[in-house]
Amino acid sequence: MKVEEAIYRKSEAPVVAKAPAVEEATDLAESWPERFIRVREVAKGLGVSVSTVYKIMAAQPEFPRPIALSERTVVWSDKEVRDWMEFKKTQPRHLTLHPGRRRKPNTVS
């Protein structure tokens, strides 16, 4: 065996277990159609920041409530969040959701 072959064989990546087939993943999705998601995933799905998720929750009573898994862990039902998104699509759309801040006029003394 040549030196080059020995170096190549040492640098080969270890064999890793293959990911489950698509059919197996589909079976899992059918057996567990609903899942829990954390606040960052809720925010990402809505396209807003984490703090905005909590603001929406405070301002809109129809927004899904979190589920406490432990003292410091809360999750949302993925299905409930998606249902809320579908509900919001049926609501009238407004160009402005809030009046915004008004600036004080510049006064020169």
Image (cartoon, rainbow, N blue to C red):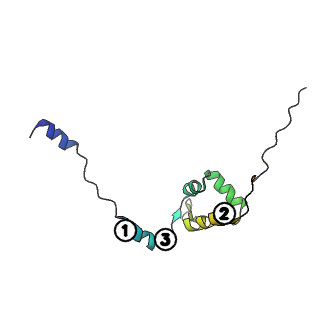
Can residue 64 be seen from the camera position used here?
no
Among numbered discs 1 and 2, the one appearing first in the sequence = 1
**Circle 2 residue:** 89
Res. 20 image quadrant: bottom left
Q: Which residue is located at x 54 percent, y 63 percent?
A: 70
Q: Which residue is located at x 75 percent, y 56 percent?
A: 94
Q: Which residue is located at x 57 percent, y 57 percent?
A: 45
- The image position of residue 66, as x and y in percent, is 61, 64
Label placed on residue 33: 3
**Circle 1 residue:** 23
The quarter of the picture where the N terminus appears is top left
Q: Mark 2 and mark 3: span between their CA atoms?
A: 22 Å
Q: Amino acid at mark 3?
A: Pro
Q: Please tell me whether mark 3 or mark 1 is closer to you in this view.
A: 1
Among numbered discs 3 and 1, the one appearing first in the sequence = 1
Q: Residues within 10 Å of mark 3 (few under 14, many from 20)?
A: few
Q: Mark 1 and mark 2: span between their CA atoms?
A: 32 Å
Q: Indicate the secondary structure of the residue bearing disc 3.
A: loop
